[in-house]
Image (cartoon, rainbow, N blue to C red):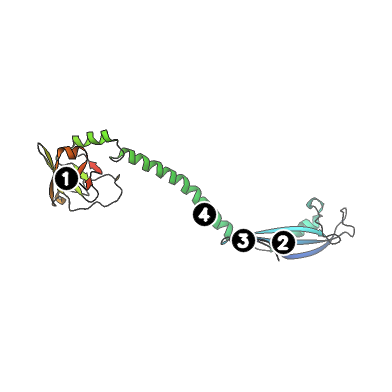
Amino acid sequence: MKIYYKAMWISVKEYTVEERNFEIKNTNCASNQVVLQLLRRDVRASFFLFPKKIAQVICTDTGKKIKKSQWSPEIMAASRAMKDNHKVPTWGFWTAGILLISLLIAIPVGIYLEIKDAETYKASYMGMDSKEKQRLRLSLEKGDLIRTMQNVYMIKNIENDSVVLVTSKNKPETKNFTDALKNEDYPEASFTGKELKVSKSGFKNGIISSSDVILNILDN
């Protein structure tokens, strides 16, 4: 066994599996005596094993390889038979192939999802510029929904100088502020919590309190 290379995650080992003696003419081998060798070269990368079967003909006089174009039909047939008889594991190739296919699928899917997320963000309240947000807030009416970091509110009433909000007992189900608010998640019967008054100027600027701001809106 020869070890050609060995590192932390990669190793290359070579074994002589079988040898057969032959006589061959019309080569640089003076005695015409050659050895047909079947070698197995194992490349191991991490836990993946990639074995390869290699046939070569060596001159017994010099130890040099004989070109494949100079092999006799008998040697060619014996080489094929030796390779067929020696079985090597193929799970490394299959596993690597499956992982590669998965990676090739995952990359475009990931790019698509990233683009989709970007488009979703741009179409959401958080993706609007400040003027668009303010215009949307000023257009809200009784029954519309507002989300902050901790709560979802419904506009109960709009008075001359304030906006009256009532808190839903249903807490926001996701930390992703761009996810659309849905009436089925926050039915009218769920708004039984604390009421609070927000000044119109504060509401216009998206401020609910000194520590809470509007993160999403459902304009019903």
Identify residue type, mark 2: Leu
> What numbered label is drawn on residue 39?
2
Q: Earlier in the sequence, mark 1 or mark 3?
A: 3
Q: Position of residue 190 (x, y in %)?
A: 16, 51
> What numbered label is drawn on residue 7?
3
Local crowd at mark 4 within 10 Å, few (<14), some, or many (≥20)? few
Q: Which corner quadrant of the image does residue 32 belong to?
A: bottom right
Asked if labels 2 and 1 touch by Cβ distance under 8 angstroms, the answer is no
Q: Nearer the viewer, residue 14 or 199?
A: 199
Q: Earlier in the sequence, mark 3 or mark 2?
A: 3
- Residue at 83% over, 61% down: 22
Q: Which residue is mark 4?
A: 99
Say above or below: 115 vs 171.
Answer: above
Q: Nearer the viewer, residue 193 or 52?
A: 193
Q: Which corner quadrant of the image does residue 47 belong to?
A: bottom right
Instruction: Indicate left or right for 91 with 64 as reference.
Output: left
- Residue at 21% over, 37% down: 137
Local crowd at mark 2 within 10 Å, few (<14), some, or many (≥20)? some
Residue most toward the front? 210
Asked if labels 2 and 4 touch by Cβ distance under 8 angstroms, the answer is no
Instruction: Indicate left or right for 106 with 45 as reference.
Output: left
Give the SS element for disc 2. Answer: strand
Q: Which residue is mark 1?
A: 154
Q: Earlier in the sequence, mark 3 or mark 4?
A: 3
Mark closer to the observer (3, 2): 3
